[in-house]
Image: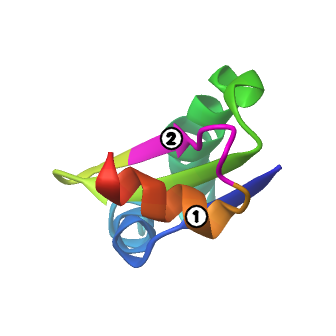
Amino acid sequence: KTIQIDDDALELVVTRGYNLAYGARFLKRFIDEQIKLPISERWRDGTHFGVRARDGEIVVEPAPANISTAADALAYGDVA
């Protein structure tokens, strides 16, 4: 399984996942809730996953079976 994260999604993780008071624990929780959990819920749906920012939120999408790489999965979401 592979995952591709676009730059906007990474920026959201950095800005919304950081908390001065809680440090790395808050970042870990954000990643768990926004990326890991959605992937685990759709684990059987695909081999490659794309993570992107859409309307200020993190969106995780599995690629269709004919998509062969995580980068293609990310590009697929731009067309879908």
Mark 1 or 2: the one toward you = 1
Residue 50 rendering spot, x and y as whole percentages: 54, 54
Residue 28 rendering spot, x and y as whole percentages: 63, 53
Estimate how packed mark 1 is, as few (under 14), some (14 to 19) or many (20 or more) residues with alpha carbons within 10 Å.
Answer: some
Give the amino acid type for the residue marked by disc 2 in the picture: Glu
Question: What segment carries the magenta color?
Answer: 59-67
Residue 10 rendering spot, x and y as whole percentages: 45, 71
Observer-nearest of 9 and 50: 50
Is residue 64 shown in magenta? yes
- Identify which residue is drawn at 45% across, 64% down: 75
Residue 26 seen from this side: no
| Helix, strand or loop at mark 2 | strand
Q: Which residue is mark 1?
A: 72
Which of marks 2 and 1 precedes in the sequence? 2
Q: Which mark is residue 61?
A: 2
Observer-nearest of 28 and 8: 8
**Circles 1 and 2: CB distance less than 8 Å?**
no
- Identify which residue is drawn at 40% across, 58% down: 52
Q: Quadrant of residue 64?
A: top right
Give me the C-alpha separation between circle 1 and circle 2. 12 Å
Q: Is residue 67 above or below residue 20?
A: above
Observer-nearest of 74 and 21: 74
Q: Quadrant of residue 66?
A: top right
Give the amino acid type for the residue marked by disc 1 in the picture: Asp
